[in-house]
Image (cartoon, grey):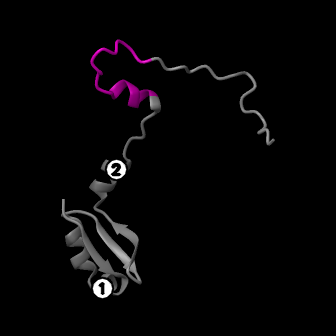
Amino acid sequence: MATSTFSSREFNNKVGEAKRAALDGPVFITDHGEPKHVLLTFEDFKAMNGKRHSIVDAIMAMPLIEGLAEVEFDTHIPSDFPRAAVFE
């Protein structure tokens, strides 16, 4: 996956070129030399942000670690949660 960089001025003058570059990977758009924006194809955006997974989904998707029979995951929420912060 290739990345490209356009200054804001270049981007404004070459939108079509930037869109074509985005087909090969993210396009960084800079202001005063600092990256400020990223242009992606919608497919790339969906692949990054499509389905949000919960921590349980992430744990279940973890490859098995040799010698580890199971993963303990405490889902108990204390009855006083949320509680006020204590600053000492």
State left or right for residue 88 relative to residue 25.
right
Q: Is 75 situated left or right of 59 in this image?
A: right
Count numbered badges in the picture.
Answer: 2
Image coordinates of residue 64 in percent, x first then y, are: 29, 21
Classify mark 2: residues with Cα within 10 Å, few (<14), some (14-19) or many (20+): few
Identify the secondary structure beneath mark 2. Answer: helix
SS class, disc 1: helix
Q: Quadrant of the N terminus?
A: bottom left
Residue 2 locus on image (x, y percent): 19, 64
Residue at image x 28%, y 79%? 15
The relative height of residue 51 versus residue 61 in the rendered view (above or below) is below
Which circle marks residue 48 in the picture? 2
Q: What residue is shown at x 35% (from left), y 87% (from top)?
A: 9
- Residue occupying the point 49% across, 20% down: 73
Q: Choose between 88 and 3: the one closer to the eye.
A: 88
15 in relation to 54, above or below: below
Task: Give the residues in magenta.
Answer: 56-71
Q: Residue furthest front?
A: 88
Neighbour tally class for label 1: few under 14, some 14-19, many 20 plus, Cα within 10 Å: some
Residue 60 is covered by the magenta coloring: yes
Sequence-wise, the earlier of marks 2 and 1 is 1
Q: Quadrant of the C terminus?
A: top right
Q: Amino acid at mark 2?
A: Met
Q: CA distance from mark 2 to mark 1?
A: 26 Å
Give yes or no for residue 66 being in the magenta stretch.
Answer: yes
Q: Main secondary structure of the magenta part?
A: loop
Q: Amino acid at mark 1?
A: Glu
From the image, tell me which residue sits under label 1: 10
